[in-house]
Amino acid sequence: MKYIVHIFLFTVYSVYSQAAFQNFGNVQMHENAEVGFHIDLVNNGIFNENLGLAGFYNTDNALSISGSQIPRFFNMEVDVVNHLFLDTNTEVVNSVSYVVGDVITPRENPKIALDYLTDAFYILENDEKHTDGYASYSGNFEFTFPIGDNDKLRPLIATNLIPYVKIKAAYFDENPNFPSTFSTSFTTSRLESVLGGVSDLEFWDFNGPDNSLVTLTWDAESDIANLVGSINALRVVGWHIADEEWKDLGNSGISGDLSEGTIDSFVFNPSDYEVLTFGALVAAEDLVIYNLVSPNNDGINDTFVIKGIELFDNDLTIYNRWGNKVYETFNYKNDWGGIPNVERVINRKKKLPAGTYYYVLNVKNKSGKSTAGWLYINY
């Protein structure tokens, strides 16, 4: 026989707060049990050996799960018009049904999440029904996080390469230059040399073990067409904590078009990165050439830098003011510090004297025209 229990009341009412079911003891739901919570759940006891279905239902008010102890449900159903708020971690062993309303976790406290255990799954998620905040997974398979922000579902897909190690993610529908719950700003103008731009519309927070792989998703609101002309130039990028700049995390696979699609990262260590979003590679026509070279080993302008040149097949030639060739190379790597490498240059292994020099740069994949200009060496 199936037993259905609907919990509507707590033994004490308060005129200032909503009634709640408070557990201070040891409660267990057995197989085939169905318990419906129409009021808040405050769990300060043992409530983690449950089978059956725990449902949260309210057509008027928000509900919450709080308390000092983590509840664990086998199946969980959410049908709360004004959302179910988690003020403590809530674990699910088998499934979550997003019927009505979001499950909302406190973004300012990433430790609190809706935790999918083992091989748990979910159904019925969409823009209006998902986890608004942090969700975690500790199983042994690829997992698509049902995460979003307000009325926008924006999944992140991760492969758990170390079985049963917890991975966690949240989506933020906000400008990374002005994040709402982080102590630092993720300035989209601070880029490593191969990047030409970073999205200022959204980002994800992802935590997992080393050698992680993630897939980001986009839709028309991501405005990818304003970031790249072709999705082949799109990249997963991450804000590097130590270097305080956005770095390229790759494009190992991509699907869709500029309006909707997915992109896979390379393998990376999430602990090195605060947040993730979309970036664009430098285009050949957008190469930035820094004219000042001061090769004195002070870490500033020690080499002739052409931002983004690593992405393209190229050849570079440098001349002195009399038109004599002093340096030439194929596939320049931003590593020239003023030492000539051609014959017929006096003191070929010593640095060139200070002064003005001229370069000619040919970049494959460009229009075929050479780029010429000047640089100044100053010690």
Image (tube, rainbow, N blue to C red):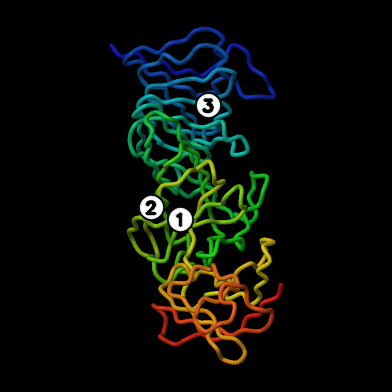
Q: Which residue is mark 2?
A: 264
Residue at image point 63% right, 50% down: 179
Residue at image point 46% right, 76% down: 329
The local secondary structure at tag 2 comes to strand
Circle 1: residue type: Val
Q: Which residue is mark 3?
A: 89
Q: Quadrant of the N terminus?
A: top left
Earlier residue among tags 3 and 1: 3
- Asked whether 80 or 188 is in front, the reply is 188
Q: Which residue occupies the extreme left position in the image? A: 1
Picture coordinates of residue 199, whole percent (x, y): 53, 60
Q: CA distance from mark 1 to mark 2?
A: 7 Å
- Asked whether 275 or 28 is in front, the reply is 275
Q: CA distance from mark 3 to mark 1?
A: 29 Å
Asked whether, in this view, residue 256 is left or right of residue 89, the answer is: left
Q: CA distance from mark 2 to mark 3?
A: 29 Å
The local secondary structure at tag 1 comes to strand
Circle 2: residue type: Asp
* Badge nearest the viewer, 3 or 1: 1
Circle 3: residue type: Asn
